[in-house]
Image: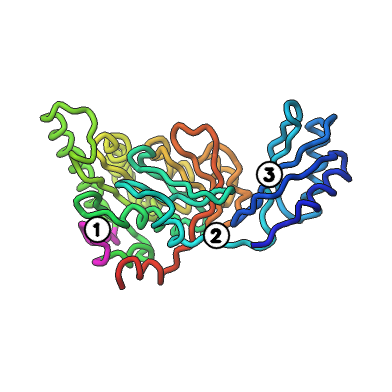
Amino acid sequence: MKYYPETLIQSTLTAHGAPCTVAPAVLGYTCTTYTAHLDGGNTPTTVKKAIGALEIATGQKITYNANTGVGNTLKITIPNPERAFPNFFAFGRNAYNKCAGEMLIGIDTDNKPITANIMDTLSVLVAGATGSGKSVAVNNLVLSLAIGAKPSEIVFLMIDLKRTEFSIYDGRLPQLIEPVAYTFDEALRLIRKTADEIDKRYKILQEKGKRKADLSDFPLFVLVIDEYAQLRQGTKEARDMLDTLMNKVVNLGRACNVFAIIATQNPVLQVINSTVKYGCQTKICLSVNNQRHSINIIDCAKAVDLLGKGDALVSLPNSPDLQRVQICDLPTADIQYILGE
């Protein structure tokens, strides 16, 4: 991995009105983070001008967080001149003590794996333009959930109307309890099956006098949908039926261990409506085509500045801040190896 030297950061900021001392950089896969200790007397305008000069010097779009009051520190994140990509095997199996429901989301700017349990993060929404790394992000989630888990602990249903993303799992992933759905009618049947599973589980919980399931009650049940936009291209009647079913999946499923992972290249309001957006309390937003797409997923325009190929902003429930992560590299050959081919 290559990065811009601390001396370049320090000399550029100092020469343009923000004298400082720069601490050793934290070198990440996609970006490098620098902490500049300002000498004092800086204003937001001064810092903004100095950052502008640094963008010219590096040729990169820079994000920063200035504290010119207490401590006079400036945290700067700069894309690396040459990127590296973390490998799934290095983190997906060994970076945490795996328990049922544990997912690997990505590697943060401090090179730490960001993991979360789907029982805490609930359903997941993944959005990104072509080439952003959306499919790789979904595969990271699926395989990190599946590795080391028995079908008695987690099961999957998968929908792939593009017929290109999930065929590798068909007949190979032990936890996949139905063939992958490749047509709208097949997809609707699997979504109905998921909704029926919720009804069945709620009845059992009611009989037990419980309001929320744990792993001793039911295995995790995960519905994975690639390119949700294609599901919404039918008639208004079909879309209304889809909305009703998905509302049950993403909002009622959480109490009985039923979750969804929903991915799309086209995160417009007509596709990712409020039912899906707010039912999926975990959002992984990769690079998108415009600010409107970014705002619809993560309520800000920052995703337009992402670099593609797995560079992502992640919103987790009960976390006020977006986290920038690099999705782990997961080529087809590695997926085949994991599946035992």
Residue labelled with disc 3: 63
The tag earlier along the polypeptide, 3 or 1, is 3
* Distance CA(mark 3)–CA(mark 2): 19 Å
Q: Is residue 334 left or right of residue 111?
A: left
SS of the residue at dot 1? loop
**Compared to 140, does 76 lie above or below?**
above
Is 177 situated left or right of 323 in this image?
Answer: left
Q: Residue placed at 71% from the left, 49% from the top?
A: 24
Decide which of 45, 296 is in the foreground and name it: 45
Front in this rendered view, residue 146 or 7:
7
Above or below, 334 against 207 in this view is below
Residue tagged 2: 309
**What distance separates the C-alpha of mark 1 from that of mark 2?**
27 Å
Q: Residues within 10 Å of mark 3 (few under 14, many from 20)?
A: some
**Image location (x, y in percent) of residue 323:** 54, 42
Q: Is residue 203 left or right of residue 127?
A: left
Dot 3: what SS?
strand
Residue at numbered disc 1: 176
Quarter of the figure that contains the N terminus: bottom right
**In the image, what residue type sits under mark 3?**
Thr
Where does the magenta region start and end?
171-183
Q: Is residue 75 above or below residue 307?
A: above
Left or right, residue 294 beside residue 210: right
- Provide residue 51's location: percent of width, then percent of height: 78, 44
